[in-house]
Image (cartoon, rainbow, N blue to C red):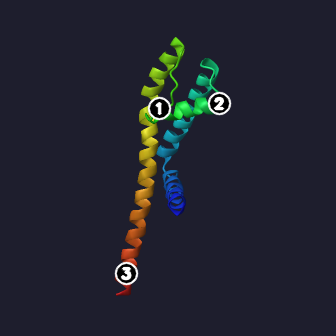
Amino acid sequence: MISLLLTIRRLAQGLWHAFKDKKFQAIFLITLFLLLSGTIFYHSEEGLSILDALYFSVTTLTTVGGSGFVPSTNMGKIFTIFYIFAGTGLTFGVVVRIAYGIFSHKDKEADKQEVSKKRST
């Protein structure tokens, strides 16, 4: 449980630092728009519940897969092809920027500790 809480804390810190970057804000908003549009599309075209449509959108954009759902309509299949190409890179861009926020924050903390050690000696 402690490990989960520490991971959530690191993720929140990474998000906090990433949101200071204008490029991250843009990529994040576009990714949210893609998730929303995918959710709406799969809900209306394929008849999935909102939660199932969101889940399928997230697993598709992150290339996790394994949801057990396959689009049944031709329009659903065509949309999914373009959805994957449009969204995968953006989604990984968000993940990379969050990771950079986490690790750059750790590096800054380590630098501060090193400077304080040098001053105290």
How many angstroms separate mark 1 from mark 3 (CA)? 50 Å
Ranked by sequence position, the earlier of labels 1 and 3 is 1
Residue 36 appearing in the image: no
User: Contact, CB < 8 Å: mark 1 with mark 3?
Assistant: no
Q: How far is mark 1 from mark 2, CA to CA?
A: 18 Å
**Amino acid type shown at disc 3:** Lys
Q: Residue 78, relative to residue 118: is it above or below?
A: above
- The N terminus: image quadrant: bottom right
Residues 87 and 80: in front is 80
Which residue sits at x=56%, y=37%? 32
Q: Which residue is mark 3?
A: 117
Among the 4 quarters of the image, the one containing residue 56: top right
Identify residue type, mark 2: Ile
Q: Position of residue 10 (x, y in %)?
A: 49, 58
Q: Earlier in the sequence, mark 3 or mark 2?
A: 2
Graded by Cα atoms within 10 Å as few (under 14), some (14 to 19) or many (20 or more), the crowding at tag 3 reads: few
Does dot 3 land on a helix, a strand or a loop?
helix
- Which label sits in the foreground, 1 or 2? 1
Residue assigned mark 1: 66
Image point (47%, 32%), residue name = 66
User: Given the image, on which type of amino acid does mark 1 rest?
Assistant: Gly
Q: Residues within 10 Å of mark 1 (few under 14, many from 20)?
A: few
Q: Position of residue 109 (x, y in %)?
A: 43, 68
Residue at image position (48%, 45%) is: 24
Front: mark 1 or 3 = 1
Q: Which residue is mark 2?
A: 50
The CA span between labels 3 and 2 is: 53 Å
| Image location of residue 108, percent across then percent down | 41, 65
